[in-house]
Amino acid sequence: MKHTVLAAALALIAAPALAEDTVALPSLGTGLAVDLAQAAVAACAVDGYNVAAAVTDRSGILLALVRAENAGAHTADAATAKAYTSASSRNPTSGMAKNVAENPAAAGLVDIPGFLVLAGGVPVKVGKATIGSIGVGGAPGGQFDEACAMKALESHAKRLK
């Protein structure tokens, strides 16, 4: 009996400390990640672009990758790197590319391992929280890659609330 009471008391004392030492962060689920990747590839196909789309969780870890049958071999790596860059920075890669071009102090961003500072990576957000990212590669310009990512996000906006 003494041990049970002591264990219960210790648990009550330790619970608040444990809560302060851990965090719960929202992150994108695999099902929605797959749907977003498919939607981005489909959006680009409508415009005649053969692309790959990668979707990561909030940490930049790949959850889904879809490549159009006629997309170049390099597009999968480019899409994945753009998604990682956007998730890691919590920003669209187009804005980062503009910042690098206009601000010499930001030029070092291109040297971060795994980063691809080209337009086409967009964070996936719920409110202000970044829960993942989508990257598209293979259209004839990053602005077109980004447009396909945005169309995918718009097509699943109800699931991101």
Image (cartoon, grey):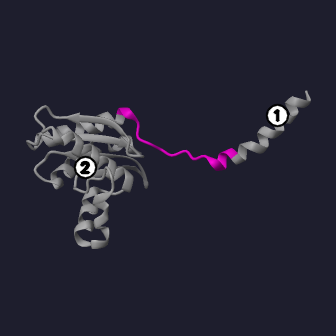
Instruction: Look at mark 2 in the image and give the residue it sits on.
Output: 150
Above or below, comparing residue 98 to residue 16 in the picture:
below
Q: Position of residue 38 (x, y in %)?
A: 24, 35
Closest to the camera, between mark 2 and mark 1, is 1
Residue at x 19% of width, y 35% of height: 67
Q: Residue furthest left?
A: 48
**Any mark on residue 7, and which?**
1
Is residue 108 magenta-colored? no
Q: Classify residue 143 as left or right of residue 105.
A: left
Quarter of the rendering containing residue 37: top left
Residue located farthest toward the top when viewing the structure as drawn = 1
Q: Secondary structure at mark 1?
A: helix
Q: On the rendered image, what quadrant is the C terminus found in?
A: top left
> How many residues crowd mark 2 within 10 Å: few (<14), some (14–19), many (20+)?
many
Kind of residue at disc 1: Ala
Q: Position of residue 76 (x, y in %)?
A: 22, 39
Q: Amino acid at mark 2?
A: Met
Q: Residue at horizontal 15%, vertical 51%? A: 144
Please report the bounds of the magenta region as a residue range.
18-31
Q: Nearer the viewer, residue 104 or 6?
A: 104
Question: Does the segment drawn in magenta span residue 29?
Answer: yes
Rendered view: 126 above or below 73: below
